[in-house]
Amino acid sequence: MTTLGEALVVMDPVSRGHLRHVGGFEKNLGGAELNVAVGLSRLGHRVGWAGRLGDDEFGKEILTFARGEGVDVSGAAMDTEAPTGLYFKEWRALGQLRVYYYRAGSAASRMRFEDLDLEHLLSGEILHLTGITPALSEGCHDLVERLLSAANERGVAVSFDVNVRWKLFEGRDPRMVLGPLAARADLVFLSDEEAELLFGGSDPASIQEAMPGTRAGTVVVHGAAGAFAVEEGGVFEKASYPVEVVDTVGAGDAFVAGFLSGRLRGWNAEECLDMANACGACAVTVPGDLKGLPTTEEALALMRGRPG
Ligand code: KDG
């Protein structure tokens, strides 16, 4: 399976409070699609990540890290004229999270459909994309549209995590950009808020009503309490695993990795949801966007009631 998107350096503050009062940062890595790729690799799958990185220290760090995690990065391009993007997290009072992006004009925002190695990207059973990429630039929006068409034509299943990043949509309506893209994916992941935005409701009945207007065979809505999947065969629900929450950023990507892992193993929707919840639960117990992504053994231990 393959994925494409922007990988970022993540600056995690060493203390809570406004960033102007924070004395230092821990440098980590993230980017929704990279998180999913690393998650799938840890779960034992062959996965390729494609993207564009600055030909700088951070870009080299991301490549080295992804390779070390067993992710195929042969679809990654290096840009000598634009930097690798980064973002800072800020944990305000009461655990409220803010993010500050330094990714405008990044190497990834300069990705173009014409530069893609389509054979490589469409070589797997599933291509995973997110709503972050089309928000990066007009060129990236065009890339996602054309990549979706190519995957649809070739019969490669597209997984699409809506992942609305409001800050990237200033002055634009995310519904206009993300709605038509999500409608062309075979498997769609949404939070409650995103389901309200694109499907007009976050309950199974609203999803069931909206689904015939889309290509999706499976729509998954996930939140802190649990998740449900809507398919032709019905609605399947699974509650979350209760764990000590340390950092929720990246939990959605861990969930997606778990669900896709189930799919690649040929599991049914309930089993996929269970794996997804277990991966999400593991991820939130460790600080950082992708450090807590579990191995298969760790996820299965939680699912079998034996956290290891
Ligand atoms: O889902 C986690 C991601 O949001 C994070 O790793 C960074 O991709 C990112 C983004 O655009 O916010």
Image: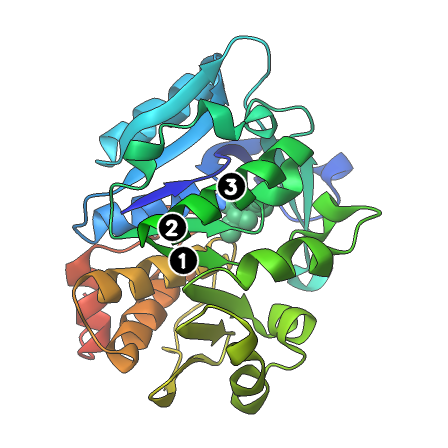
- Find residue 294 and report its image quarter: bottom left
Q: Nearer the viewer, mark 2 or mark 1?
A: 2
SS label for mark 3 = helix
From the viewer's perspective, tell me whether residue 238 is left or right of residue 110.
left
Pointer 1 residue: 159
* Above or below 149: residue 159: below
Distance CA(mark 3)–CA(mark 2): 11 Å
Pointer 3 residue: 146
Q: Nearer the viewer, mark 3 or mark 2?
A: 2
Q: Nearer the viewer, residue 276 or 119?
A: 119
Q: Position of residue 118 (x, y in %)?
A: 35, 33
Q: Earlier in the sequence, mark 1 or mark 3?
A: 3
From the viewer's perspective, tell me whether residue 164 is left or right of residue 72.
right
Q: Which mark is residue 153?
A: 2
Q: Which mark is residue 28?
A: none
| Label 2, residues with CA under 10 Å away: few <14, some 14-19, many ≥20 | few
The answer to whether residue 117 is seen in the rendering is yes
SS label for mark 2 = helix
Q: Name, please, the residue furthest toward the front.
A: 153
The amino acid pointed to by label 3 is: Arg
From the viewer's perspective, tell me whether residue 139 is left or right of residue 129.
right
Q: Position of residue 145 (x, y in %)?
A: 55, 45
Query: Total of numbered circles in the picture?
Result: 3
Q: Position of residue 78 (x, y in %)?
A: 45, 16
The amino acid pointed to by label 2 is: Glu
In percent of the image, x 26 and y 28: which residue is there? 67
Disc 1 within 8 angstroms of ligand 1 (CB): no
Q: Nearer the viewer, residue 216 or 84?
A: 216
- Find residue 133 and report its image quarter: top right
* Above or below 127: residue 21: above
| Label 1, residues with CA under 10 Å away: few <14, some 14-19, many ≥20 | many
